[in-house]
Amino acid sequence: MRPEDPVFDMGSPADPRPLSPSVLRKLLDRLGEKAAVPHVFPHRFRHTFAITYLRNQGDLFTLQSLLGHSDLAMVRRYARVAQADCAEVHRRASPVDNWRL
């Protein structure tokens, strides 16, 4: 398999066709409508993966590599979202913050 080979083929084994971005978008639109989930688009999966990866203690450098970013600028945006989540969870769960004195 070459890097430029499609990951998914549409059609039949006798007539395989690569899954193009426009076909993927249409497929996700239909699935989102059927599931009554608004704003379903390919980048949302990428964003969700990145945030979940960091929430599960993944590191920034590995995430940068997985996403194919040349620098950490975009990855830092995801890190800020994950860090804000951590701060909120800490406020809710901290025994000191929840003392009723």
Image (cartoon, helix red, strand yellow):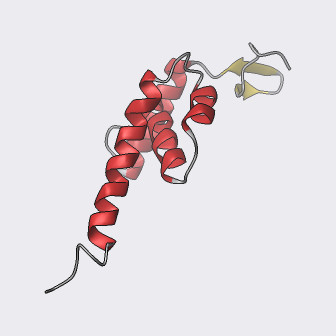
Residue at image location 23% in from the left, 72% down from the top: 97
Q: Quadrant of residue 74?
A: top left
> Percent from the top left, x then y, of residue 81?
35, 43
Q: Nearer the viewer, residue 79 or 1?
A: 79
Taking 44 as reference, is 98 above or below it?
Answer: below
Name the residue at the bottom extreme: 101
Q: Residue at x 57, y 28 (%)?
A: 64
Q: Nearer the viewer, residue 85 or 38?
A: 85
Extreme residue toward the left, this view: 101
Q: How many marks?
A: 0
Q: State the image coordinates of residue 77 (x, y, percent, origin top left).
A: 38, 32
Residue 17 screen position, x and y as percent: 71, 18
Q: Is residue 67 left or right of residue 44?
A: right
User: Farthest top residue?
Assistant: 4
Rendered image quadrant of residue 89: bottom left
Give 43 or 55, whichever is nearer the viewer.
55
Residue at coordinates 68% horizontally, 19% vertically from top-left?
18
Q: How far across and how far down the image is residue 32, in percent?
A: 40, 43
Residue at image x 16%, y 85%?
A: 100
The quadrant the N terminus occupies is top right
Residue 40 can be seen in this image: no
State whether residue 37 is above or below residue 61: below
Res 4 quadrant in image? top right
Q: Is residue 77 visible?
A: yes
Q: Left of 91 or right of it: where is 83?
A: right
**Where, quadrant-wise, is the C terminus in this rendering?**
bottom left
